[in-house]
Amino acid sequence: MTTTIAYDQLADLGGTDLGHTPYRTVTQDQVNLFADATDDHQWIHVDPVRAKEGPFGAPIAHGFLTLSLAVPFWTELLDVKGVSTKVNYGLDKVRFPAPVAVGSRVRMRATVAEVAEVRGGYQLTVDQTIEIEGGTKPAVVARGLYRFYA
């Protein structure tokens, strides 16, 4: 469910649990396209036959592919009205505790840890966890930094 707020309400968002997104399936086509975009064609990602015999028993998504899903997930969780610019400012404390097998379904859970004024806008520090459906460990744990300008 998307939280929709006005720009002038951002300062009060600290500590807000934004919930989680719907699940989405990670496909082999996505993994192959990511491999082409990043020139990372390691067999554990792009060779399903060999990957079945590998350490994970299946091809897995690149960690950075899974992390990049934070972008569409983030827009599903928070919509800020009355802004001229939204900027993905960066990440802190990124970890990949568990691999994502191709065909798995993942979603993101997020909590706004803090809100700070920055020159001309606000910066949100967001604790983000990308979960694997049925998994015991998350795929990604990261702290995202997002800026909003009026």
Image (cartoon, helix red, strand yellow):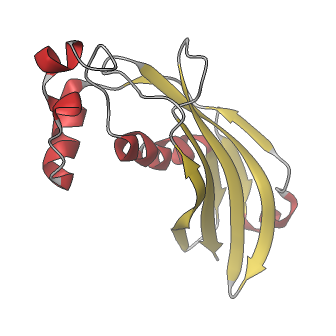
Query: 10 or 38, which lies in front?
Result: 38
Q: Is residue 101 above or below residue 4?
A: above
Q: How far across and down, in percent of the image, does residue 124 sit?
A: 70, 63
Q: In which quadrant will I find the N terminus?
A: top right
How many numbered marks, from 0 up?
A: 0
Q: How far across and down, in percent of the image, does residue 84 sit?
A: 55, 74
Query: 76 or 30, which lies in front?
Result: 30
Decide if residue 56 is on the left or right side of residue 85: left
Q: Residue at x 51, y 32 (%)?
A: 139
Q: Is residue 77 above or below residue 139?
A: below
Query: 6 or 145, which lies in front?
Result: 145
Q: How far across and down, in percent of the image, does residue 10 sit?
A: 78, 63
Q: How far across and down, in percent of the image, does residue 133 sit?
A: 53, 16
Q: Is residue 73 above or below residue 82?
A: above
Decide if residue 30 is on the left or right side of residue 2: left
Q: Residue at x 51, y 41 (%)?
A: 73
Query: 19 or 92, which lies in front?
Result: 92
Q: Residue at x 71, y 73 (%)?
A: 122
The image quadrant that residue 141 belongs to is top right
Q: Is residue 58 above or below residue 85?
A: above
Pick out the residue farthest to the bottom. Answer: 119
Q: In which quadrant will I find the C terminus?
A: bottom right
